[in-house]
Amino acid sequence: MKKKLISIVVPVYFEEELIAEFYSRMHPVMNQLKSRFDTELIFINDGSKDRSLEILLELTKKDSRVRILDFSRNFGHQRAITAGIDYADGDAVVIIDSDLQDPPEVIPEMIAKWEEGYDVVGGTRKARKGETAFKLFTARIFYRLLNSLSEIPLPLDTGDFRLMDRKVVKVIRTMKEEGRYVRGLIVWAGFRQSSVLYERDARFAGETKYSLKRMLGLALDAITSFSEKPLMLAVQLGLFITAGSFLAMLYLLISRILRPESVVAGWTSLFVAILFVGGVQILVVGILGVYIGRIYRESRDRPLYIVQETYGFKKRNSK
Ligand code: UDP
Ligand code: MG
């Protein structure tokens, strides 16, 4: 019987310092699987300008299981993963970071769950080492906020480290939306989902490529793709304030009639009301703007990423 193929998808962005180490950790895991599975290792060079591509090309010479997708520029982590999913041939596809924060040794556990019949096996972080207190705090808030807003329950503290069956891969490939939050899309797809616990290590070398701005971007993409609640909130806020100002209006009218001499004294309350309503209006318009911006982005229908060159793929893939 033909062995099943496991595709391992690895996004790479300015990681020259750690690709060799990543491969040397991955290699034994691939060998361990060898008796039962074929493996392919798909690196996506997400527009790194350092020696990452060069080092990856060396790997393709050494190991015929290594493949490379070279992007024309930096398209970001989520799109790099998307490309890997699009090009992977495996019966199961595993997404893993290149910085060894996700330990490759967990992959066989994921495969075991897959063989039990689960279609998606996520890695849930039991502990996260080597992250700043700020990142831990913001991540905690983010996952909980997202979950309370989202229309589907998204698992807490789960990154993109996961395995999915080919049938899930096929579904993900049909999702062409621009503001991508891949782990959300996978949950959205459904199927039988499970997870394994693991300890997230510190980065092996280099620095995080997620600046605060990028984290905010990901958070906005996540929230706007999985929730319309902020729009609902804007409406509720609007209603609440309208009701409030109606009461205030009544109060002012009545006091105008009953105590005409006291009216000029209302300057402070007037000013506060103007500021407050002005602020709320800007907030609500801002929320609308975010969603309209998304509609605009989706409507342009551009490709999600551009692969300028592929290396190590046997045929032009069945994409
Ligand atoms: N990455 C990428 N493109 C980017 C940013 C990051 O392909 O624009 C890759 C990066 O090389 C790493 C993974 O995505 O393999 C996760 O990035 P990082 O470790 O910087 O994020 P963090 O773990 O700090 O959230
Ligand atoms: Mg990392």
Image (cartoon, grey):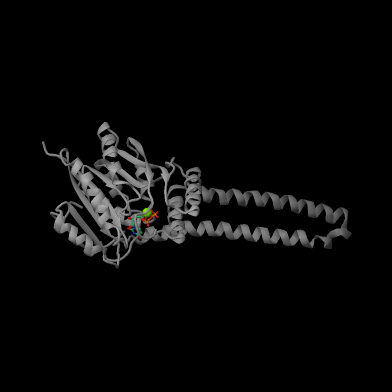
Instruction: Examine the rendering and report whether any part of residue 144 can be seen.
Output: yes
Give the number of callouts: 0
Q: Residue at the spot x=44%, y=47% of the render?
A: 226
Left or right of 231 in this view: 27: left
Q: Residue furthest bottom?
A: 49
- Residue 78 picture location, percent across and down: 35, 55
- Residue 102 picture location, percent across and down: 34, 48
Question: In the rendered image, which quarter is residue 167 located in?
Answer: top left
Instruction: Examine the rendering and report whether any part of residue 308 can be seen.
Output: no
Identify which residue, 103 or 261, lies in the foreground.
Answer: 103
Left or right of 73 in this view: 135: right
- Residue 87 picture location, percent across and down: 22, 52
Taking the image as four quarters, which one is ligand 2 found in?
bottom left
**Is residue 111 positioned above or below 247 on the image?**
above
- Residue 264 picture location, percent across and down: 83, 63
Left or right of 139 in this view: 57: left
**Is residue 252 positioned above or below 32 on the image?**
below
- Which quarter of the rendered picture does the N terminus lie within? top left
Left or right of 191 in this view: 313: left
Identify which residue, 44 or 224, lies in the foreground.
Answer: 44
